Amino acid sequence: MATSNDIRPIGLITALSQEYSVVDSVVAPACERLIAVQSGLGRAAGFLAAAELGRRDKRLSGLVSIGFCGALDAAIATGSIVVPNRIVTADNERFDTDADWASAVADKMADFPLVTQTAIYCATETIETQAGKQATRSQCGACAVDMESAGIAHAARRFDIPFIAIRIVLDEAADTLPEATRDAVHSDGNLNVKGLLRGLASRPADIGGLIRLAGKSGKAQKQLKAVCEALLPDFGFTR
């Protein structure tokens, strides 16, 4: 029988507090196997959080980039789950995900709206407009975009451990993000209420867009919770 000393934990890296609160609430009861961490925004933050987790737990068995993403493919709707086979960047870097692990995850989520065998683009800044999303998709061919996965994948490569990404679509390719959201989140991934209020004060017309975005965020959070529950106790990692 395996003991607690035999268990090699899996690191789940989220960027935003909204993502972390959902993931941790589900995986905390399985904390011997799964460790959720909030990194903050961007590739560097993702790398540092994953690297620190790896240094803290030398027996880490794998890393997962998990949370929200934006769709670049017009066929992908809010609430869809993207399990990519690679992460790409503007510098033409490529980080392949672990094929066996990603396949096991896809098998466990067969009843979900799933997108596989495609790329996620790791951006250096938020892509806010429909035109920007179209241009990015034309350039790199990715179906979705986030800002942390390349950093987490880079850390996994450094530690020579498997990596996958599981991202739930929040904004669709046709959506333009309200300008008032630009300062709505601190760099550590926590909500910046004052920044949001300042944005609304200068852009009161954004209130309708914020309401629509909040609805999409609620749907994405529910889907994230369902995904985490479906993947317990080991997120499909069987090695």
Image (spheres, helix red, strand yellow):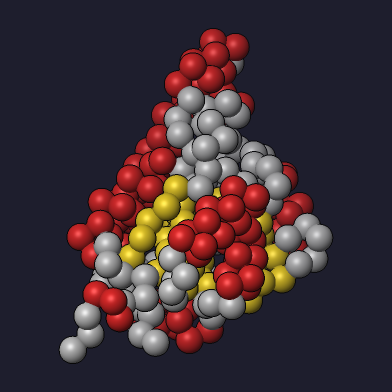
The image quarter containing residue 60 is bottom left
Identified at 55% across, 14% down, the residue is: 198
Identified at 60% across, 29% down, the residue is: 182
Q: Quadrant of the N terminus?
A: bottom left
The image quarter containing residue 148 is bottom right
Image coordinates for residue 67, horizontal then vertical, percent: 45, 54
Image coordinates for residue 134, horizontal then vertical, percent: 71, 52
133 shown above or below 3 = above
Identified at 65% across, 50% down, the residue is: 44
User: Does residue 169 appear left or right of residue 120 in this picture?
Assistant: left
Q: Quadrant of the C terminus?
A: bottom left
Image coordinates for residue 104, horizontal then vertical, percent: 40, 83
Q: Is residue 157 visible?
A: yes
Identified at 64% across, 52% down, the residue is: 43
36 shown above or below 205 = below
User: Does residue 73 appear left or right of residue 215 in this picture?
Assistant: right
139 shown above or below 239 = above
In this rendered view, identify the residue nearer to me: 144 or 65: 65
Image coordinates for residue 217, horizontal then vertical, percent: 40, 42
In this rendered view, identify the residue nearer to me: 3 or 80: 3
In this rendered view, identify the residue nearer to me: 65 or 112: 65
- Total number of numbered discs in the rendering: 0
Q: Is residue 200 visible?
A: no
The image quarter containing residue 212 is top left
